[in-house]
Structures are given as structure tokens and as C-alpha cells.
């Protein structure tokens, strides 16, 4: 249950966080230019409501649609949420959080159903009309159903808040807020519930206490200070000062979550601290003009009205002091896990919330492989390593007659499609892959051709199809048609046999020079190949390396080309030797045919071994262009 709540909360947070800049802009507009602001300006104050009522919901819904279905999801969600906005008198931030994923799911479902059924030449027509029609249908649904439903919910919540305020019970919401933070529900609560209610109050009085309920940095600050001064663990004491700065000034509340997870009973301290702060704010009538996002002291004070700066600051101090005292007592009489274990637990919670497997799960494959429709192999440029990895894995799947509808493709790590179910990349690219595809299962590998995690994924996918089978060798590709792109991609003069090199960098530069000599690239491309190697190795496994340039240097490529340098004695690429070094320059996809042939060769071990040492150029050309 905790994992499901965490996953839900992190997804909602993922819709809000990329748009925090828009919240800050709106907050400053409110704090500065409304009638009760620092610099009242009725003309500029007229921007406040449109930004709140239209811009923020459209941004949030668009991000939610993008997280589910990429750019098409973003467009459909932006259309659909306008129906919610026009169908309610409330600010539809909560409606946007519902409509965004719904719109993304709708267009993704349509695209999967339509895949393979669109007549050639009608793709653009179908894609544009499907997005427009689905967006329109959802906008109507939003106007008549989702918008009014959210109005009812927000009306009930607003009434509930009024009751809590009337009876002096508002401080008790801290009992729910502080644990919700650790489950990553903070942004959903703050911007989905508190901000819409606070916006109405701020429009009337210039301030609202609703903006202060979740964002107060004081409770977390008290926990960190207690660990700094009272923890018995040296590592924890040393880590706390840095965490204090990040939390208090940077506004990143996640930094203190591991300290809670180290000793879960300590959650009582920030709860008590926030209760005391909210009680103080209700007594003094304090409030903020706009949302303090992120929840740093700087943002908190920036959103404070002119006459409320001192009470706002005192509330932070009260929360921190009470939280510190409670945490110190708990640390004195109880012990918990160490910081490293707690941080690992939080990363697991974040991974589960993103739908990304942990390291243990990566080796076992996806939890529900029967629902896997698309696997994406990703490398830095999407030019070589990922293409070969995708081709070989696709061949294995098809040879086993398993998951015939499975799509296996490749791309650069920064352009992973939103509908990817599984992303395969090298370990050093994992963070970039997570950022680009937060909802995909991530499998990290050492190399794209021979890695146990890929073997486990293959075994899982084929067993789901009801067949525990060994992969058969793929059928040999037919000869390339005369005059095809293959004839220009690999030429006889681009193959050098019997070479020697002192190290991999000498071999990579030799490949780069040959690409330049044959007119495929500018001379500067060679150093881009070295940069790419320094980022992550281009060694593929099985004695094959495919050095190529970084994605930033694609502009130096004149046309697609491949060269081959053979090193019979081998060249060290890390812990293994490469005997065949394919230098690659790609503009489009012409070079992928040759890489596919290389993958086919890898299934024929005798031919591959012969290719590593042969002096017969005709044999090489025959095998690579077969």
C-alpha cells in the first residue's frame, strides 16, 4: 500500500515540479502587484488571474499528458483541460492533475491500437485528426463531468477548511501533511488542494495561510539540526550540516526524508513542530501572498506581505525549535538504521514511484512482462551502440517466436519516447534515461551485446510467451539491392586489415581519420569520437567496438559512412580486447543496415572469429554486405 501511494504521489509531483517556475512567476506577480502587494499596480495585477486560472492548469495537464504519451499526450491534455477550466469556477489545478494522465492514456491507447493499420501516406492525417478529435471529446467530458466533479470536491474541501479554522482545528492537518511528504504527496497536496483554496483567499485579502501549511521549512530543519547535534553516528552528524543548507535555502525537502526513514518514530517531531507553527499563524493572522515553491526560507520570505514578515519568520523558528526538541529526545532514547540504508530505502521508494526497477529487479526483468509493448535501447547519440543492441535483441526475440507484437527500437538517451515500457542503457547513462523516461522500467547494462541482464530479460519475455527456448540463429539477411544505401556506406577502401594500435584511442583516431579521408565527416569529428569514448565505452562485446561521435557533433557529419579497422592482436577497450573496430558516422539510418549485418555475424561464431584475423578483403565485404 505504501508503495502504491508513493508511486501515485511521485507521479503527481512529476507533473508539478517541471512547472515550478510558472508558480514562482505567478507568486511574485501576486506578492508585488495586487492591491495589498508591495508595489500595487492594477494593470499588472490583471495578469494574476489568467496566469492562475489558465496557464498553470494547462502546463500541469500538458506535463501529465507528456509523461504518459510524449508530445501527442501533451497536446491532447492541453486541449482537454480547457474544458475543465471553463466548466468550473475554481482554479483547476486538481482537475489538471486528473485530466493530464487521462488524456495521455487515451492517445497512447489509440496509437497502439492504430499501429500497423494506417495506410501509407495517411500517417500525418490520422495523427493530427486523432489528437484533435480525442482532445475535443475530452474537453467536452471535462466541461460537463470532470470540471463540475472537481468543483464539488474543492467545495467540500473548502468547507472543511472553514470548519477547521472556525473551531481552531486547522493545526491538526499537520498530522497528515508531514507523513504525506515522505510519501512524495507534498506537491499534490500543496498545489492540488491548498493552492486553489489559497488563491481565493489571497484574491480577497492579499494573503492566505493555506500557502504555509505544507511549505514551512521549519519542521524538517528541526529534524536535521537534531541529527547534527544529537546523533550518535559520526557519518550522520557530518552529513547533516550540508543537508541543512540544501533544505533551508534550497527548499529541497526531500533531503531530510532519509533522516526520518532512519528512525520512523521521529516523524512525530515535525508533526508537532508544524502544529505549533500553524497555531501561531492562525493567532497572528499571518499568510503568504503566493505559494512558496520550492519551500525554502528565501521563497517563504519573498511571498510574505509587508506587514507579516516577522510573524512568518517566527513561525519557521517555532516549527524548527519544537521539531528539534522532539527529535533530540527521540534520538536520545531510540536507535534506528544507518543513513546509507535509509537513503537506499528512499531511492527504492522513488524508483517504485517512477515505475523504475531497483538493481535487484533489473537483473530479473520487468515485474509484468506480459504488458511490455516497446523496448528502447538508448545510447548517447542513438547512432551505433543502441542500434546494434536493439537489432540483436530483436533478432533473439523473433528467432524464439515470442512476443511477435513487441517493438524493439533504439534512440539517443535524451529522446526516449514516452510510450517506452522498458529502457535499456549503459549504467553511466542511467540518470539521463530516468529523467527522459520516468515511467519506464530501466535496465542498466555493461555492454549491448553480451550482458546477463539482457539474457534475463530475454528469458523473462520468452517464458511469458509460454516458451522457455534457446535463441536460434536469425535468418541471414538477403543481399542488399544494387544501388542501395549500403553500397555507399561501406566501401572497399574503408576497410583496413592487419592493423596495430597501442591503445583504444589510437584505434579510434585512426577510424576517425579514415572517415574524414573518405569524405564522410569533417576532421573535427575524430576528437568527438574520443569524447564519446570518454563518456561511455563504445565496446560492444564479443571483440567488436563501434566508436562514433557525440550527438553534439552530428553537424560535422557530411553523409553516413562506416569504416572497419581490423586488429588481429586486439586492442584493449577496458578489460576486454576489440579485434574489429567499426568507425561510424550517421546522418540518417543508412548505416543501420550494416550494423544489422554485423549483428547477424555475431550469431555465426566461426565467421566472426575468421573476420577478426582474415587477410581476405573479399571475404570481409561478402560477409558484411550479405
Image (spheres, rainbow, N blue to C red):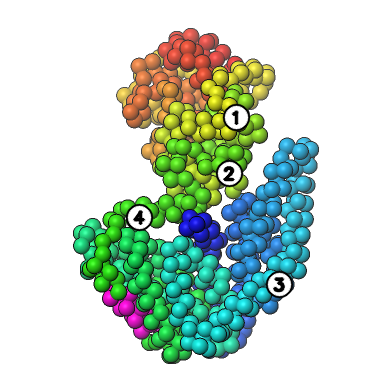
Circle 1 sits in a helix, a strand or a loop, which is it? loop
Figure quadrant of residue 373 = top right
Residue position for label 2? 420
Circle 4 sits in a helix, a strand or a loop, which is it? helix
Mark closest to the chain's N terminus, 3 or 2:
3
Mark closest to the chain's N terminus, 2 or 1:
2
Residue in view at x 42 percent, y 51 percent: 348
Q: In front here: 263 or 197?
A: 263
**Mark 2 vs mark 1, CA separation in Å:** 23 Å
Circle 1 crowding by C-alpha within 10 Å: few under 14, some 14–19, many from 20: few
Q: In front here: 256 or 247?
A: 256
Instruction: Give the prevailing secondary structure in the magenta stretch.
Output: helix
Q: Is residue 160 above or below residue 16?
A: below
- Name the front one of labels 1 and 3: 1
Q: Which mark is residue 343?
A: 4
Residue position for label 1? 466
Q: Which mark is residue 582?
A: none
Find the magenta span and give its range: 312-325
Q: In front here: 31 or 80?
A: 80
Q: Classify the position of the C terminus by image quarter.
A: top right
Residue in view at x 30 percent, y 78 percent: 321
Amino acid at each position: 500500500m505504501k508503495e502504491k501511494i508513493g508511486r501515485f504521489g511521485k507521479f503527481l509531483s512529476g507533473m508539478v515540479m517541471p512547472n515550478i517556475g510558472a508558480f514562482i512567476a505567478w507568486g511574485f506577480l501576486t506578492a508585488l502587484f495586487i492591491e495589498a502587494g508591495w508595489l500595487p499596480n492594477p494593470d499588472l495585477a490583471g495578469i494574476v488571474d489568467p496566469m492562475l486560472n489558465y496557464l498553470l492548469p494547462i502546463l500541469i495537464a500538458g506535463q501529465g499528458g507528456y509523461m504518459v504519451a510524449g508530445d501527442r499526450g501533451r497536446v491532447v491534455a492541453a486541449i482537454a483541460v480547457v474544458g475543465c477550466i471553463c466548466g468550473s469556477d475554481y482554479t483547476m489545478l486538481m482537475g489538471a492533475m486528473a485530466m493530464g494522465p487521462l488524456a495521455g492514456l487515451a492517445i497512447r491507447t489509440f496509437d497502439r491500437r492504430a499501429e500497423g493499420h494506417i495506410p501509407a501516406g495517411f500517417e500525418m492525417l490520422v495523427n493530427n485528426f486523432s489528437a484533435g478529435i480525442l482532445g475535443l471529446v475530452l474537453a467536452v467530458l471535462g466541461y460537463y463531468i470532470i470540471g463540475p466533479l472537481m468543483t464539488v470536491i474543492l467545495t467540500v474541501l473548502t468547507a472543511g477548511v472553514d470548519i477547521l479554522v472556525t473551531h481552531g482545528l486547522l493545526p491538526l492537518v499537520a498530522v497528515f501533511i508531514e507523513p504525506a511528504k515522505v510519501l512524495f504527496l507534498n506537491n499534490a497536496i500543496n498545489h492540488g488542494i491548498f493552492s486553489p483554496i489559497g488563491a481565493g483567499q489571497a484574491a480577497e485579502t492579499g494573503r492566505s495561510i493555506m500557502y504555509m501549511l505544507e511549505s514551512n521549512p521549519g519542521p524538517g530543519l528541526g529534524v536535521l539540526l537534531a541529527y547534527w547535534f544529537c546523533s550518535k553516528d559520526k557519518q550522520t552528524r557530518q552529513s547533516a550540516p550540508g543537508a541543512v543548507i540544501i533544505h533551508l535555502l534550497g527548499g529541497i525537502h526531500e533531503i531530510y526524508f532519509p533522516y526520518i526513514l532512519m528512525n520512523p518514530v521521529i516523524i512525530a517531531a515535525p508533526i508537532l513542530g508544524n502544529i505549533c507553527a500553524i497555531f501561531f499563524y492562525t493567532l497572528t493572522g499571518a499568510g503568504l501572498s503566493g505559494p512558496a515553491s520550492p519551500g525554502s526560507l528565501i521563497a517563504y520570505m519573498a511571498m510574505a506581505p509587508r506587514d507579516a514578515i516577522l510573524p512568518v519568520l517566527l513561525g519557521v523558528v517555532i516549527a524548527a525549535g519544537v521539531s528539534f526538541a522532539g527529535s533530540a529526545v527521540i534520538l536520545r532514547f531510540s536507535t534506528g538504521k544507518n543513513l546509507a540504508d535509509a537513503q537506499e530505502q528512499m531511492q527504492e521508494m522513488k524508483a517504485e514511484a517512477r515505475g523504475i526497477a531497483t538493481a535487484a529487479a533489473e537483473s530479473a526483468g520487468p515485474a509484468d512482462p506480459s504488458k511490455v509493448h516497446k523496448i528502447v535501447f538508448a545510447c548517447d547519440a542513438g547512432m551505433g551502440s543502441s542500434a546494434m543492441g536493439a537489432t540483436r535483441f530483436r533478432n533473439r526475440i523473433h528467432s524464439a517466436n515470442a512476443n511477435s507484437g513487441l517493438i524493439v527500437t533504439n534512440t539517443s538517451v535524451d529522446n526516449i519516447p514516452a510510450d517506452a515500457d522498458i529502457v535499456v542503457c549503459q549504467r553511466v547513462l542511467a540518470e539521463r534515461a530516468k529523467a527522459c523516461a520516468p515511467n519506464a522500467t530501466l535496465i542498466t547494462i555493461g555492454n549491448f551485446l553480451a550482458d546477463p541482464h539482457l539474457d534475463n530479460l530475454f528469458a523473462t519475455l520468452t517464458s511469458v510467451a509460454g516458451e522457455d527456448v534457446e535463441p536460434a540463429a536469425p535468418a541471414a539477411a538477403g543481399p542488399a539491392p544494387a544501388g542501395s544505401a549500403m553500397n555507399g556506406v561501406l566501401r572497399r577502401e574503408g576497410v583496413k586489415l592487419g592493423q596495430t594500435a597501442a591503445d583504444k584511442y589510437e584505434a579510434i583516431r585512426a577510424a576517425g581519420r579514415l572517415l574524414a579521408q573518405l569524405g564522410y565527416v569533417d576532421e573535427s569529428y575524430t576528437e568527438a569520437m574520443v569524447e564519446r569514448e570518454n563518456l561511455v565505452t563504445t565496446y560492444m562485446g564479443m571483440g567488436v567496438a563501434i566508436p562514433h561521435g557525440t550527438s553534439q557533433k552530428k553537424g560535422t557529419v557530411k553523409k553516413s559512412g562506416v569504416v572497419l579497422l581490423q586488429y588481429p592482436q586486439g586492442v584493449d577497450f577496458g578489460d576486454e580486447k576489440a579485434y574489429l573496430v567499426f568507425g561510424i558516422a550517421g546522418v540518417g539510418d543508412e548505416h543501420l543496415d550494416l550494423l544489422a549485418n554485423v549483428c547477424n555475424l555475431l550469431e555465426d561464431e566461426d565467421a566472426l572469429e575468421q573476420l577478426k584475423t582474415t587477410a581476405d578483403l573479399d571475404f570481409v565485404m561478402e560477409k558484411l554486405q550479405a
